Image (spheres, helix red, strand yellow):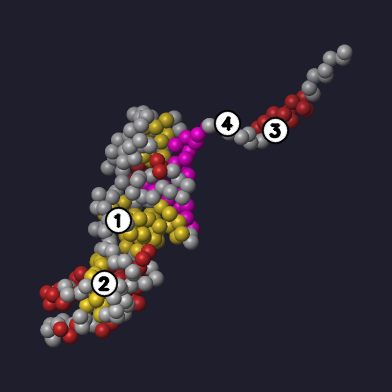
Amino acid sequence: MKPLPDPTPALIAMTVVLATVMPFPALRGQETRPYDACDQSAECGDKDFEYPFWGLGRPAHCGHPSFQLTCESNVPLLVLDSVNYRVIDKESTTHTITIARNDLWSTICPQHLRNTTYDTNLFNGDNFGQEDVSMYYGCEDNNSITPGIWSLAPDYRFDCNVNEPQSNNYFITTSSVVADVANFLAQCNSSITVPVGRRWANRLATVAATDEDLRQALKDGFTLEWMVNNDVCDRCDRSGGKCGSSSTSPDEFVCYCSSGNFSATCNNVSVKSKGSRGK
């Protein structure tokens, strides 16, 4: 029996090339490292999101529990205190988002009236020159206000039915409310308040303001700064890590690194199941 010929150099070279370029399936049971998973952003429409946001295929341990995103018709949505908000803009360097209420996007007469609230431990909305505008539903006619003191301009009124027959409804900025106005508005059946940008607040405070101005102000939204481990996450990023949270204690910050999981920065203090609270 003749011995088998030795592999030729060309055959050996071809085998090496194929082994280099051809992908092989991952071993069964092999899991993606948190570092690799958190390297992927959450995407919706033309926007992408990193920590503290998660959802849309980005695992929960790559974000903060209160920042879950969904996506509808290429519009990113964030729920704050049971109210859906459209994310209009996001700026990671300043930790800010501009959001608009989804229930007020196409109407100023939503079926369910909810106030605009958010957790002030998570967000700061005080540094952007914004002002609240309130919408009052089911009011009496404004002729009951003492003449000569103040009256609601005709265009401050808007029409809609909110769980009742046609009624008088008004909008007004916080700075425009004086005593007689407050007494008049107190008899309205219900109201909601939404922050608007300074430009729109100035416009809505004039007698020329219309309900179309109000609609556009609500669509332009308002800005919030998120305050979730901002400093510690920045340090984690600079050390080459990926910001995230503990899988066993979601409120705890973890810096995921290629070499393991750490409490603040890569090669700092290794953690297994708990991180540290950042500011």
Badge 3 is on which residue? 18
Mark 1: amino acid: Asp
Of badges 3 and 2, nearer the viewer stands 2
| Residue at 58% across, 33% down | 26
Dot 1 crowding, Cα within 10 Å, few <14, some 14–19, many 20+? few
Image quadrant assignment for residue 8: top right
Q: How far from the left and from the top, in percent, is residue 105?
A: 38, 68
Residue at screen point 26% across, 84% down: 154
**Residue 160 location (% of width, % of height):** 32, 77
In the picture of the structure, the residue carrying the numbered disc 1 is: 81
Q: Which quadrant of the figure contains the C terminus? A: top left
Q: Label 2 vs label 4: CA separation?
A: 59 Å
The residue tagged 2 is: 135
CB of mark 3 within 8 Å of CB of mark 1? no
Hey, which quadrant is residue 247 in on the image? top left
Do tag 2 and tag 4 residues touch (Cβ < 8 Å)?
no
Q: Residue 119: x and y, percent?
A: 26, 53
Disc 4 packing (10 Å; few <14; some 14–19; many ≥20) = few
Q: Earlier in the sequence, mark 3 or mark 2?
A: 3
Q: Mark 4 highlights which residue?
A: 27
Q: Residue at x 77, y 27 (%)?
A: 11
Q: Which residues, given as a range, are shown in magenta?
A: 30-53
Q: Amino acid at mark 2?
A: Met
**Magenta-drawn stretch contains 48:** yes
Q: CA distance from mark 3 to mark 1?
A: 55 Å
Q: Position of residue 248 (x, y in %)?
A: 35, 35
Per the model, the C-alpha gap separating discs 3 and 4 is 19 Å
| Mark 1 and mark 4 residues within 8 Å of each other at the beta carbon | no
Image position of 169 with respect to 25: above or below: below
Determine the CA span between mark 1 and mark 4: 42 Å
